[in-house]
Image: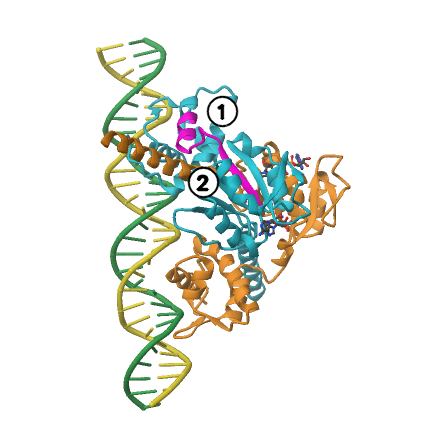
Chain colours: A cyan, B orange, C green, D yellow
Amino acid sequence: MPNRAIPDATVARLPVYLRALLELAEGGEMTVSSEDLANLAGVNAAKVRKDLSYLGSYGTRGVGYDVEYLLYQITRELGLTQDWHTAIVGIGNLGRALASYKGFSERGFRIAALFDVDEKVIGEEVGGLIVRHLDELKDIVTDDRIAIGIVATPPQNAQEVAERLVDAGVKSILNFAPAVVNVAPDVNVRKVDLSIELQILSFHLQRTQAIASAREANRQLGG
Amino acid sequence: MPNRAIPDATVARLPVYLRALLELAEGGEMTVSSEDLANLAGVNAAKVRKDLSYLGSYGTRGVGYDVEYLLYQITRELGLTQDWHTAIVGIGNLGRALASYKGFSERGFRIAALFDVDEKVIGEEVGGLIVRHLDELKDIVTDDRIAIGIVATPPQNAQEVAERLVDAGVKSILNFAPAVVNVAPDVNVRKVDLSIELQILSFHLQRTQAIASAREANRQLGG
DNA sequence: TGTCGTTTGTGAGAACAATCACAAGCCCGG
DNA sequence: CCGGGCTTGTGATTGTTCTCACAAACGACA
Ligand SMILES: NC(=O)c1ccc[n+]([C@@H]2O[C@H](COP(=O)([O-])OP(=O)(O)OC[C@H]3O[C@@H](n4cnc5c(N)ncnc54)[C@H](O)[C@@H]3O)[C@@H](O)[C@H]2O)c1
Ligand SMILES: NC(=O)c1ccc[n+]([C@@H]2O[C@H](COP(=O)([O-])OP(=O)(O)OC[C@H]3O[C@@H](n4cnc5c(N)ncnc54)[C@H](O)[C@@H]3O)[C@@H](O)[C@H]2O)c1
C-alpha cells in the first residue's frame, strides 16, 4: 500500500482529472498521457504525474495511463464508489437551484432531504422532494443516513444551522452563506462564497486599472 | 509606498476581514485587535497581522486597528470604491438565482445585463432586467462598461461563451460551469465548482470511514 | 517621567506546493 | 534480442504560505 498522505492541493485536482477522464472514456480513448490529461485539466503535466503518483503507480512508461483503470482508481480514492446522501437547508433562491440541479446525482450525490423554517415553504415540492421543517432534521438525517449538509440560509442563521447539522451527526458541510462557521475539528466545512470570488476579480481589475492610469500620468508628465 | 506585491492567499482573505470589519463597524466598535479579528474571520492572529502588513502599517501597537480606517484601506485595495458592472450569461436555474440575489449589489457589483440564447428566455424579465440575446453581448458590454462576466451556461458552451466575453472586452470571468476554460493570460478566470467541493468532502468522509472499518477489522482479528 | 501591560510588525524557520529535469522502463520495428 | 522513441515516476530545487516568537511601540497610570 502506498504511503497514504495525499496533499490537499492534489485532492482538489482529482475531481478535475476525473471529469477529463470521463470525457476521454466517452470518446472511446483507451489510454491518455500526462501531457494530454494536463491540457484537458488546464494544469502542468509534471503536476498531473506527481498527483497521480500519490494514488500509486498506475501508468505505463512509454504509453500513458489506462483511462478506465485510472477512472476507477480516482473514483475509489474520492470515495465515489458509493452514493452520499445530502440535505439542503434553506430553500430560497439558491436552495431551489441546487435542489433541482441534476448534476449532483450524476456525480454520486443524492439530494435526500430539504429543510426550511418558513411555513410558506414547508410542504412545497421542490425538485421532487417535499420541504421539511428544520425540527425534523435529526430524525431524517439518522433515518436516511445523510452524510453531507448544504447550508443555503441567510448568513445570520448559518452558524446555528451548522450546529444543528453537526448535532444530527453530519460530518461534512458545504456552506453557501457568507459567514464564518465554527464547528468541532472532526467536522469538515467547505465554503462557497461568490462575493469573495468577485472581490478577488475586482482586486485584479483595480490593479491593472491602477497600473494603466499610472502609466498615463507618466506619459503626460514625460511628454 | 509599501512594496506592492500582495500574496494571492492574502487577497483571498481580505474579503473575509472586510465582512468582519463591517459587522464590527455596525456594532459600533472603534478598534479591533488582530486576535479578535482572527476569531471573527476564523484564522490565526499572526496571519491577520501579516496580511494587514502588506497593505501598510495601519495598526497601533498596544491598541489594535481602527475599524473605519482599516475598512477603507481594504475597500480601496480590493478596488471596491467603485461599482463594477457585471453580466450573467445563461439564465437557467442558477443564472436566475444569481440575477435576483441582492447580496452582489450590496458589495459593489451591479448586475447590468443578462444573456441567453434560448428564444423562450429572451425578453423575459428576471430580477428587474430583460434577458438579451447573446449576439447583443459585444455592444452592451461596451456601452455599459461591463467588466465582469459570469458564465452560468451548460459546460459544453462555457468555453465558447468565455471567448465571446473576452472578445467583447471582458477581462474577468467567474465560471460556474463544470468545465475548464482557457483564455488569454491577461484575462482572469475564477471557477466555482460545487461538484468539486462535494467530491473533496467525499474524499474526507471516505477516508474516516476507511479508517473506522480498518480499526473494526483489527479489533475482530485481535479479539 | 518611568513603569507596566498590551498589541503590532516582522525576521526566521517550518510546512507545503509547484516545477524542473532526467533515469528508468516500456513498446515496437527490424 | 537490440536500439530508438516515448512517457512515467520521482529526486532535487525553487517558490509560496503558514506559524512562531519577540523586539519595538503605544497608552495608561502613578
Ligand atoms: N441567491 C444567490 O444567487 C446567492 C449568491 C451568493 C450567495 N448566496 C447566499 O446563499 C444564501 C441563500 O441565498 P438565497 O438567495 O437563497 O436566500 P433566500 O432568502 O432566497 O432564501 C433563504 C431561505 O432560508 C430559509 N431560512 C432562514 N433561516 C433558516 C433557518 N434557520 N433554517 C432553515 N432555513 C432557514 C428562509 O426561509 C429562505 O427560504 C444566503 O446566505 C446568500 O447570501 C446566495
Ligand atoms: N443549478 C445549480 O444548482 C448548479 C449547481 C452547480 C453547477 N451548476 C452549473 O451551472 C451551469 C448552469 O446551471 P443551470 O442549472 O442554471 O442550467 P440550466 O440548464 O437551467 O440553464 C442553462 C441556461 O444557459 C442557456 N444557454 C445554453 N447555451 C448558451 C449559450 N451558448 N449562451 C448563452 N446561454 C446559453 C440555456 O438556454 C439555459 O437558459 C451549468 O453548467 C451547471 O452545471 C449549476
Query: Does A78 lie within the magenta span?
Result: yes
Q: Nearer the viewer, mark 2 or mark 1?
A: 2
What is the chain identity of the residue bearing mark 2? B
Q: Label 1 near label 2: C-beta < 8 Å?
A: no
Q: Residue at x 60, y 58 (%)?
A: B107
Residue D30 against residue A219 in the figure, above or below: below
Residue C13 position in % (x across, y down): 25, 56
Mark 2 Cα shell of 10 Å, populated few (<14), some (14-19), many (≥20): many
* Quadrant of image for the C terminus of chain B: top left
Q: Secondary structure at mark 1?
A: helix
Disc 1 crowd rating (10 Å Cα; few below 14, some 14-19, many 20+) is some
Residue found at x 64% / y 47%: A92
Respond whether the residues carrying marks 2 and 1 are from the same subunit.
Answer: no
Q: From the Cβ of disc 2, is ligand 2 less than 8 Å away?
A: no
Left or right position of A87 against B127: left
Q: What percent of the width, then of the height, locates residue A131?
A: 62, 41
Task: Check disc 2 and report the residue beneath it.
Answer: B201
Q: Left or right: A69 with respect to A217?
A: left
Q: Is residue A184 magenta?
A: no
Point out residue A9 in the picture as x, y percentages from the top left corner. Answer: 40, 42
Q: Is residue B114 visible?
A: yes
**Residue type, mark 1 in image:** Leu
Task: Pick whichever, B159 or B50, lies toward us.
Answer: B50
Q: Is B195 drawn above or below residue B142 in the view shown? A: above
- In the image, residue B178 sits, relative to residue D20, either above or below, namely above
At x 44%, y 33%, the residue is: A38
Q: Which residues are magenta?
A: A71-89
Q: Which mark is residue A24?
A: 1
Above or below: residue A20 compared with residue A133: above
Residue type (three-letter) at the residue carrying disc 2: Leu
> At numbered mark 2, what does the secondary structure look like: helix, strand or loop?
helix
Q: Quadrant of residue A46?
A: top left
